[in-house]
Image (cartoon, grey):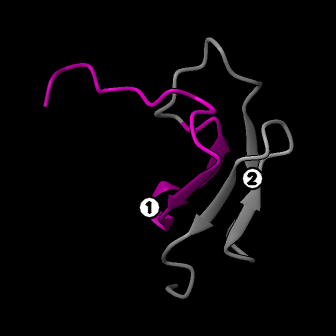
Amino acid sequence: MSSQQERIQANAEDHYEVTREQLPLSCPTPGMTLWNSHPRVYLPIETTGSATCPYCGATFTLTDANQS
């Protein structure tokens, strides 16, 4: 892997799957470029297993929601 990780374009998709390892969840996520995005907002996904960003409408699903 190179010294610079490949960045995901922010707001490029409308649905993302995340794992507990990636929490706390924010939109845009840390791996996304920020120059053309909205302010970072943290989303509570732990209890319900899903969350929607109030800025861009992207939905997030916790793929390992049943694990503690």
Give whichever of 14, 68 is nearer the camera: 14
Does residue 1 appear left or right of residue 15 in this picture?
left
Total tally of numbered discs in the picture: 2
Residue closest to the far top: 35
State how far apart marks 2 and 1 are (Cα): 15 Å
Mark 2 Cα shell of 10 Å, populated few (<14), some (14-19), many (≥20): some
Mark 1 Cα shell of 10 Å, populated few (<14), some (14-19), many (≥20): few
Residue closest to the far left: 1
Which residue carries the number 1 mark? 21
Instruction: Please state the horizontal and vertical placement of residue 10, each as a whole percent of the image.
Output: 58, 29
Does residue 59 appear left or right of residue 57 in this picture?
left
Residue closest to the far front: 13
The earlier-in-sequence mark between 2 and 1 is 1
The residue at the point 51 percent across, 30 percent down is 32
- Report whether residue 39 is seen: yes
Which residue carries the number 2 mark? 43
Instruction: Please state the horizontal and vertical placement of residue 4, each as a whole percent of the image.
Output: 26, 19
